[in-house]
Amino acid sequence: MNTDLCVSPISAFKDNYIWAIHTQTHAVIVDPGDARPVWTFLQKKHLQLSAILITHHHHDHVGGIADLVGRHPAPVYGPATEVIPCRSIAVQEGNTIELKELALTMHVLEVPGHTAGHIAYYTDGMLFCGDTLFGCGCGRLFEGTPEQMHASLTKLANLPRDSEVYCAHEYTLNNIAFALTVEPRNPDLLARAVADQNRIARDEPTLPSTIGLELATNPFLRCQISQVQDYARQASDHPLRSVTEVFAVLRTLKNDFN
Ligand SMILES: [Zn+2]
């Protein structure tokens, strides 16, 4: 791994994170929903835009692309099966992307569920997962089925445990509140609640998390755990015959959780 590499959050809208992967001179931007805060960040740090990586077509992830590439031409990578403005290179599962200025190779993972063509980018212990996996939660199923989303989350859960997870929204505290209704006595979850409340109180992001932390605390990655299954069974009006059905019940409960 390139030891000069930094990953910085750029806050946008109410709770989006646009991630900048950068050296002292070049930056790759993930999901620029708004160009203004990205441009300000690049100017302040004297960084040249090197490439843009897009995970899915939602406006809060693609809205700033045209403005950014209008100011400074750069390749725009995005999912092959979605309509992405200014996309110059369509990518799909198994493709690799050489980010030469960062000395980094990105691997493309298809993770449908939040949207039908959603992809994630993985490299050297870092995962950029858009709106698929969140801190202690997961994305809503706008276009995919519970089966697809559960398979996508399982794919991410199988990455090395120390992989850093860079999600696109600061939803962690609300997700933890929901997770505590499912597993109120999970010691890792209780510890995470304190740690992340402290981060937010200090005005710091709760991200990145790690795959290991998500496996220990995120109910959507824990549908095979008996406590999680018992909770879903009690909340369901029909018998649950598979881990995917447990996942589907949890996702529905979370949709109504505030
Ligand atoms: Zn989205």
Image: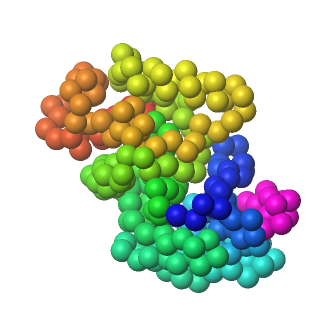
- Say above or below: 136 vs 231: below
Looking at the picture, does residue 64 appear above or below residue 141?
Answer: below
Looking at the picture, how far across and down is residue 60, in whole percent?
A: 64, 57
Indicate left or right for 7 with 70 as reference: left
Q: Can residue 230 be seen in this view?
A: yes
Q: In this view, does 171 lie to the left or right of 23?
A: left
Residue at position x 54%, y 82% in the image: 89
Report which quarter residue 65 is drawn in: bottom right
What colouring method underlies this structural image? Answer: rainbow
The residue range painted magenta reads: 34-47
Pick whichever, 102 or 203, lies toward us.
102
Total labels drawn? 0
- Is 37 one of the magenta-colored residues? yes
Q: In this view, does 220 lie to the left or right of 53?
A: left
Judged left or right of residue 224, residue 130 is right
What residue is drawn where x is 48% and y is 22%?
191
Answer whether residue 235 is magenta in the image.
no
Is residue 81 positioned above or below 32 on the image?
A: below
- The residue at 37%/46% (across/down) is 161
Q: Residue most toward the front?
A: 3
Where is residue 90 shown, x and y percent of the image?
49, 80
Prevalent SS, magenta region: helix
* Image coordinates for residue 131, horizontal then vertical, percent: 50, 52
On the question of residue 35 being in view, the answer is no
Q: Residue furthest top?
A: 185
Nearest to the observer: residue 151 or residue 7:
7
Q: Where does residue 77 sit, x and y in percent of width and height?
A: 55, 75
The residue shown at (66%, 30%) is 200
